[in-house]
Image: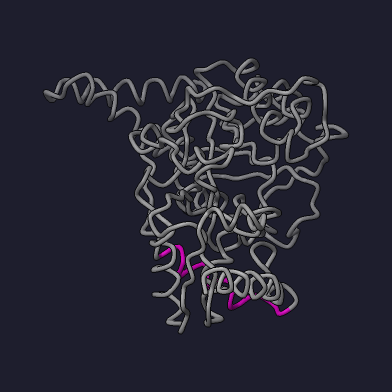
Amino acid sequence: MNNDRRRFLKTSLLGGAAVAAGCTPEAATEAEAKAEAARPMSILILGGTGFIGPHMVREALRRGHEVSLFNRGRTNSELFPDLKLFKGDRNSGLQSLEGGKWDVVVDNSGYVPRQVEDSARLLSSVVSHYLYVSTLSVYAVSPAPITEASPLATMEDESGEEVTGETYGPMKALCEQRVMAMLGADRTTVLRPTYICGPGDRTDRYTYWPVRTMRGGEMLWPGTPTDDIQIIDVRDFANFTVDCLEQKIVGTFNTVTPMRSFKMGDLLQDSMAVTGADMTPVWVDKEFISENEVAEGGGLPIWEHPDGEYAALSSVDGSRATAAGLKNRPTRETARDTLSWWKNLPADRSDKLRAGLSADKEAELLRSWHEKNA
């Protein structure tokens, strides 16, 4: 008897027993889903050693699943020495994956539509479920709130392969479409995360705020304390990813903190609480920020200008993911653990933040602000 047949009989018997015991058909279906979720799976992760990948790997292993990786073996190559690594470059070929078979695949490293289409084509016959990690950047400029049905960004030349600030979103949208076309809606999950943050974040976009707070003194804060922002802790994102695999949750989901539940003032309070620093916040209005182009080049990460092109990205409806099981931990826990991780980094990494205002630029802006308001 093959594995698929055993699985069918197992879940059918469990579901039938639930109905016989007086459960509703809905409860029986839930029992089947839980039985399926308890079965160890073979998971292939494309990527797996960057920022979000290791959290997914650890969570999947913690739940008893078998994990294999496909990557170039360059980024954090010392991680997971006991896992099977299929070495390869998505741009030059997927030969190392040929002949393999897995239950599910998680695509963390797909940015170019051609490459994603190639992987989806190769794996469509050897996996039952394809989960693609996308981004909120797929959305076109549109009024808030953004939902999964909001218009997507497009690009004139869909064959283009250069990833830039302008093409990143449209290319990820095309990648989503290629996966869906290859595997169908009943075998595809698309996750659209906002700013992913937490221990291991290589961008420092969220990390900037608690780390800068730790330095103390006057600190420039943009807009007002009531300006909405949205994030997702990398561990919550990883947990939801594995939930989707275990329960075969398909469809498209915005993965964010609940809309209008987290504001710049909350980020400030979290940063103060976990650092205990003697920091004086200076709230600088949006007009000053525009006049001085403060937000350009990642100077004020996470915060979106309320009148800016991307303001709606701070008002994203994540209720669909919440209903499917996404659970967001308290934001203060994210701040605490991010700061703890940062403090244990080697000096050559923690000497300079990769996002946010430099000390000199911030001091210059604060002088200008005080002069303007003298």
What secondary structure prevails in the magenta region? helix
Side (left or right) of 54 relative to 144: right
Image x and y of residue 21, in percent: 13, 25
What's the magenta region? 333-347
Residue located at (60% from left, 19% from top): 180
- The residue at 46%/78% (across/down) is 280
- Residue found 41% across the figure and 47% down from its top: 257
Residue at x 52%, y 17% (from the top left corner):
185
Camera-side residue: 363 or 232? 363
Foreground residue among 233 and 56? 233
Q: As displayed, is residue 368 above or below residue 229?
A: below
- Asked if the stretch drawn in magenta spans residue 335, the answer is yes
Question: For residue 28, which quarter of the picture?
Answer: top left
Is 168 or 242 nearer to us in this picture?
168
Q: Position of residue 208 (x, y in %)?
A: 58, 66
Percent x, y of residue 178: 67, 20
The relative height of residue 62 versus residue 254 in the rendered view (above or below) is below
Q: Quadrant of residue 170?
A: top right
